[in-house]
Amino acid sequence: MNEGQLQLDRQWLLHRPITGPRNGHIGEQVFCEKWLELQQREVEFREVDEPEHTTKLARIITNAQLPKFGERECSVAASWACYLGCNIGASVIHLGDRLKDGAGDYRRFIAAWAIHNTRSIGVNGGYRAIEIMLAPAACRNTDPLSYGGLKCAPDLSLTDYEVIEHLWLWLGTDEGAAWLEDCQREIDRRQAAAWRAEREFDNATNTGETAKAGKE
């Protein structure tokens, strides 16, 4: 350790999404894991004159100029990462790619998010995408006779909106694009492995049933 530097405790923030990845949803699981891995890939030391608790996330969204930085901001960011792994999150990424020529690399995903996050009475019960993304369990409709969704909107702050918007902007940077590609490669790998395992199981089951029928 160089003189004049302090050790950075990377574990003081948990980077846990408000609602974790669902079982069987490989995309959500991979994005959450890769986001946590990215946040833990921080420098081991910080200069003494840097803001206290300097983290990878704080540097990613530095243009947001947040008055404070803590666990809420990390949970919001982790929830965004998890959202990227669901079908709707993938559709925002796909739209961003289509908007590349008009909006450019840096702003293509924030442009897609602005379209996707628009409130519409006939879509998702009138809730914004960010409200669904950041809704805690208490806001979710768990009635077995309902179609799911939200029963009330979460209380979101301006900071929550700032964090999400600057994360979409970051995704359009070279670093963000590289991270996105890394996530997609891992998703493809796991999906292929799951497909092979399922085929092997089906083949083994069919072979067993055929052998049993032959004995009968």
Image (cartoon, rainbow, N blue to C red):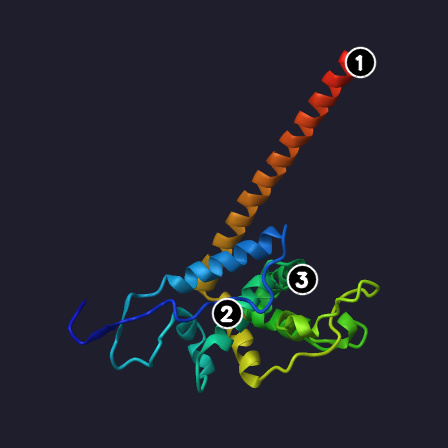
Which is closer to the viewer, label 1 or label 2? 1
Q: 195 above or below 25? A: above
The amino acid on which the numbered mark 3 sits, given as a three-letter code, is Ile
Which one is earlier in the sequence, the residue at label 3 or at label 1?
3
Q: Split into 4 quadrants, where in the image is the N terminus?
A: bottom left
State the SS at label 3: helix
Q: Is residue 93 visible?
A: yes
Q: Is residue 54 placed above or below 172 in the rendered structure?
A: below
- Near mark 1 (Cα within 10 A), the count class, few <14, some 14-19 or many ≥20, is few
Tell which circle, 1 or 2, labels the residue nearer the N-terminal end: 2
Rendering coords of residue 174 (x, y %): 44, 63
The residue beneath circle 2 is: 106
| Badge 1 element | loop
The residue that label 3 is drawn on is 88
User: Residue 79 occupies which quadrant of the picture?
Assistant: bottom right
Residue that mark 1 sits on: 216
Amino acid type at mark 2: Tyr
Residue depicted at 73% across the width and 72% down the height:
150
Question: Quick one: which residue is furthest to the right in this view?
Answer: 145
Callouts 2 and 3 close, C-beta under 8 Å:
no
Camera-side residue of 96 and 162: 162
